[in-house]
Amino acid sequence: MKRAVVGPQLSLDGTAIGERAAAVAEEPCLIIRTCKHILESGVSCRQPAVAGRKYCRAHLELRLRRRRMVRARRRHRGLKLPRLTSLEAVQDAQTRVAVALAFGHIDPETARVLRCGLTQAAAHLRYMARQEGLAKGHDGLGGKVQRREISSIGTMG
Ligand SMILES: [Zn+2]
């Protein structure tokens, strides 16, 4: 077996590498793992990481929150509602809620809350249609409104 005999190695500043390593070892060794999260500005967080984890407390909570949101979104994947811009759209949404409930994509409590919201949306749309209709001379839902002549109300004697 050959053994390589190496002389003292010197670094660029002339001190022997062995001496330097000894000097470094004497300094109090304080290694704190920092958070691996990359901020929106592009720099890393640099807060001390929670023991045994890669992220600081704030970013661990952020990651947990995001994971929960992804899970919740996955749970409601079977239900996608249309934009509630008309009574037909609201009716379509009510049907979708019923189907999602029937197939177990949403729980009964979520379906109840959604139905309540859709009922309110329908009432609001009907109100808006009625207001527009009154301005145009009909009730907005197909019926005609009889308008009293303003001139006949104000005249007396
Ligand atoms: Zn952090």
Image (cartoon, rainbow, N blue to C red):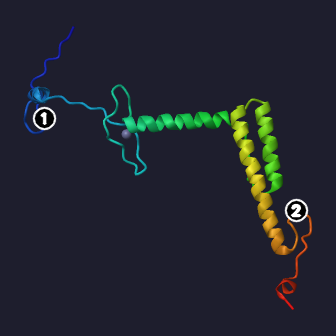
Judging depth in this view, the residue of 14 and 98 nearest the camera is 98
Give the image location of residue 33, x and y in percent.
30, 32
Examine the image and state in which quarter residue 54 appears: top left
Extreme residue toward the front, this view: 157
Q: Distance between the residues labelled 1 and 2?
A: 90 Å
Judging depth in this view, the residue of 129 and 93 nearest the camera is 129
What residue appears at the point 79 percent right and 50 percent down from the top-left corner?
Answer: 90
| Residue at disc 2, CB closer than 8 Å to ligand 1 | no
Count up the numbered dots. Answer: 2
Judging depth in this view, the residue of 100 and 157 nearest the camera is 157
What residue appears at the point 76 percent right and 35 percent down from the top-left corner?
Answer: 100
Extreme residue toward the bottom, this view: 157
Extreme residue toward the top, this view: 1
64 displayed left or right of 12:
right
| Circle 2 crowding by C-alpha within 10 Å: few under 14, some 14–19, many from 20 | few
Decide: is 8 above or below 3: below
What residue appears at the point 13 percent right and 26 percent down from the top-left corner?
Answer: 25
Disc 2 designates what residue? Answer: 141
- Kind of residue indicated by mark 2: Leu
Determine whether label 1 and label 2 are within 8 Å by CB. no
49 displayed left or right of 118:
left
| Circle 1 crowding by C-alpha within 10 Å: few under 14, some 14–19, many from 20 | few
Judging depth in this view, the residue of 101 and 63 nearest the camera is 101
On-image quarter of the N terminus: top left
104 displayed left or right of 15:
right
Please tell me the numbered disc located at residue 11: 1
Examine the image and state in which quarter residue 97 appears: top right
Give the image location of residue 39, x and y in percent.
41, 46
Q: Quadrant of ligand 1?
A: top left
What residue appears at the point 33 percent right and 27 percent down from the top-left corner?
Answer: 51
- Kind of residue indicated by mark 1: Ser
